[in-house]
Amino acid sequence: MPSFTRSVSHAILLVLAGVVVAAVTNFLRPGGLPWKGDWSAQAQRELSLRGFDSITRGEYEAMEREGRLVLLDPRGLRLSGATPSPGSLNLSPGDVPPRIGELRVLSDAGMVLVVLCESERCALGAELAATLRKNGFSAFRVFRWEKRRGPPGEILPEKREGT
Amino acid sequence: MTGSPRFWTSVLLVMRFILGGVFLYAGVTKIIDPAGFAQSIHNYQILPVVLVHPAAIILPWVEVVAGTALVMRWWTGGASLLLSALMFVFFIALAITVARGLDISCGCFSSTGEGKVSWLNLVRDFFFFSVGAVLFLYHDREGRRS
């Protein structure tokens, strides 16, 4: 058998061996990856916020009543076009390094810092959370509101217009 | 290719270990975090989404099997051909990404901490592709097993 044909045959056999080993190990390993992935906006959000501590709406409302809540709005003033509501900070991911000291003061004072998802997909919220962690600050949680119930009324303009 | 047989045997041996070792390492880092590797593949926006997970499951094991074959000197021609073909595909994917200016991680060795895809990744891939091509063309020059 000519050398090239033999090499091609061997390459195909190596691929087949890889496929078989991959299928078997993926089937046997706990938490193996499903063969069909979910790349919807919802799944993307879950993935981008993986590893961050989230806060439920109940906890959010309780902390708000106690006056311990500081919301971090990732859209920043320029995007939100609104003066921050009392108890919230407009903090875009790019603003994190110069304002990290301010966040530490609030955290040390016993305030609970919560990154607010700007939309259901939470792309900016996830970016803000990742930027905070990258800058050595991890004393925060993330509020992922459900589309069914909508965002907190006092913070996001979409909700204000609708009410 | 000229030179003494012993010299070329040594050169081809080193090349086998470099290319095989690189693919073994790359495959293992992806097997450890398949979800992260799937995200890296998805970020390239080249494969249809239905193929992202199958690629994330299969590709690392193909790399490990072919890398092992190359290091162990089993089917060296087939293994080097396969790894060169993979390098060529990765090179094209990286070139498209650089041309599109996508701000994504390479995902070549792990899903995180590699920084943005750049021309340096292209140079590295071309180097490994060349190593694979030389191994494929001259693998029969390496001394016969005793």
Image (cartoon, grey):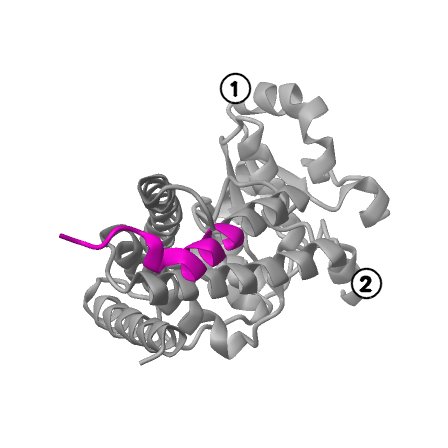
Secondary-structure class at tag 1? helix
Q: Position of residue A20 (x, y in %)?
A: 25, 74
Q: Residue at x 51, y 59 (%)?
A: B87
Q: Quadrant of the C terminus of chain A?
A: bottom right
Numbered disc 1: what chain? A
Chain-order first, disc 1 or disc 2: 1
Residue A49 horizontal/vertical position (percent): 51, 51
Q: Which residue is mark 2?
A: A161
Q: Residue beneath label 1, please?
A: A108
Q: Is residue A18 above or below residue A80?
A: below
Disc 2 marks which amino acid?
Answer: Glu
Residue bounds of the magenta highlight: B129-146
Number of labelled discs? 2
Determine contact: label 1, label 2, CB under 8 Å. Answer: no
Question: Which image quadrant is residue B88 in?
Answer: bottom right
- Horizontal arrangement in the rendering, residue B118 relative to residue B68 (left or right): right
Drawn side of residue B40 relative to residue A81, left or right: left
- Relative depth, front residue between A38 and A53: A38
